[in-house]
Amino acid sequence: MEAYANVLLIAIPFFFVLIAIEAFYGWWKGELTFRSLDTISSLSSGITNTLKSILGLVVIIISYEWLVSKIAIFHIEKTWLVYVLSFIAIDFSSYWNHRLNHAINVFWNRHIVHHSSEEFNLACALRQSISVIWGFGALFLLPAALLGLPGEVVATLAPIHLFMQFWYHTKHIPKLGWLEYIIVTPSQHRVHHAINDIYLDKNLGAIFCIWDRLFGTFQEELDNVPCVYGVKKPPQTWNPIRINFQHLYLLTQDALRTNSWWDKIRLWFMPTGWRPADVAKRYPLQIITDPYTYEKYDTRLSAPLEAWSWLQFILANIFITHMLLQLAVIGFPALFYYGAFIFMLIYAYSALMDRDPNAIWFEAIKSIFGLGVLYFTGDWFELNQIFPLGNILIIGYLILSVLVVAYFVKTEISQEASLIIAKK
C-alpha cells in the first residue's frame, strides 16, 4: 500500500503537468479542448478513483495468484520473455474486459464515467470508475495463468499498462502512419470515445490495436465524420460520484417498474441500453439521436463561483496528498474516515457546480463530519506532526466553506430559481 502511495505521489503531479501543457498548447493554437467545469469534474473523478484504490474498496472474487496455483500447466522463470508475454496477456485481458463493459447493461456502469466527458483531452483520461465493487478481471488472464506467468510480474506490469493509456486522450496528435497498425493511437481512441453511430463500441484495445482488427471492432477515424464525445444518455451533472452510479440507478428503477418478472432478471445482462418494452414506453429517456445538434451540458457559473470551485478542487488535492504522505501514520480505520471526508468534499463542491440548491446541505454535512473528527481525535489525521497550526486552519476552512456556499446558494442559485418560478 505504501509503495502504491509513493507511485501516486509521483504520477499525479506528472499527469497534472501534462494536462497543463496540453491546455496551454491548445490555447496557443486556438484549439482549446478544455472547459473549466468539465476539467474539474474529470480531475475530481481521478481523485475518487485514487481514494478507492488506497482504501481497497474492491472485493476480489478470483485472484490471479489463485488461478495460477490451480490451472498452470507450465512454470516459467523470470526472464525478459516472461515480461513480454505478461504484458501481451494483460493487454489481451484488457481488451475483453473492456469489451464486456461496453456490451452488457450491468457492466456498462463500471465504465460509463470514463466516457461521460463531452470533451476529449488528457483530463478525461483520469475519469476512472469507483463503481467497480467486484473484482473478477483475473478470468480474462486465463492464457497467462495456463502458461504459469508469475503473479508478481503481472502485478508489476498492470499499473504500467494502465498509465500507458493516458497519452492518447488528446485531439492534438494526428494519425501516426504505420504505427496505426500496431498500437492504439490518439486517432483510434478518439473514435472509441465518440457517440457517432459508426464509431460506437469500436477500438476497444488498450495498447495494441491488433485485438480490434482480429475480432472485428476496429474503426478508422474518418475525415468526413468528426467525432462527437460523451455518452448517448448525457449525465447532465458535473458530480463524478453521481455519474458513477446513474446507470445502475436506472437499471434498478427499470427492474422495479417493469411488469415482467423475466425482464426484471434479464435486463441486467442484456446488451447495453436495452430496456423492458413496457418501461421504455412509460418512462422514455433523453437519448442523443443527432450528435451534431446536441448542446453540451453547461451550468455557466459566475466568475467568483467558478474560482471557488477551483479552490475546493485544489484543497481536495491537498487533502489527498496529505493522506498519501501520512498513509502509514494515519492507518486504518482512520483512513476510511479521511476518505469519507474527501468524498463528501467532492460531492459538495460538484453539487454546487451543478447549481444544486441542496449543495449547502452537502457542504454542511461535510463540515460537521470534519469538525467531529477534530473533536473526537484532537488532531486532523496527524496533521499537527507536520504543521502545528494545522487544526486551526482546518476549523477555519470548515466554517468558512459553509458560509461561502450559503452565500452562493442564496445569491446565485436560489435567487435564480425564484426568478424562473416567477416567470412561469
Image (cartoon, helix red, strand yellow):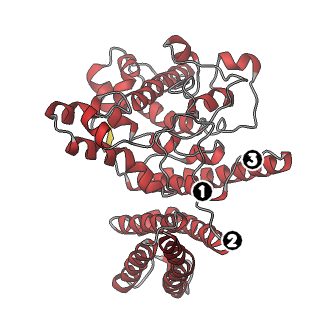
Residue at mark 3: 22
| Residue at point 51%, 53% (across, down) | 45
Judge left or right: residue 261 versus residue 170.
left
Judge left or right: residue 233 versus residue 169.
left
The amino acid type found where label 3 is placed reads Glu
Q: Residues within 10 Å of mark 2 (few under 14, many from 20)?
A: few
Q: Residue 362 placed where, x, y %?
A: 41, 72
Cα separation, mark 2 vs mark 1, equals: 14 Å
Residue at mark 2: 303
Q: Nearer the viewer, residue 22 or 105?
A: 105
Which is nearer the N-term, disc 3 or disc 2? 3
Which is nearer the N-term, disc 2 or disc 1? 1
Q: Residue 62 placed where, x, y %?
A: 29, 34
Q: Can residue 133 be seen in the rendering of this structure?
A: no
Residue at mark 1: 298
Q: Residues within 10 Å of mark 1 (few under 14, many from 20)?
A: some
Q: Is residue 299 above or below residue 282?
A: below
Q: Nearer the viewer, residue 216 or 233?
A: 233
Cα separation, mark 3 vs mark 1, equals: 22 Å
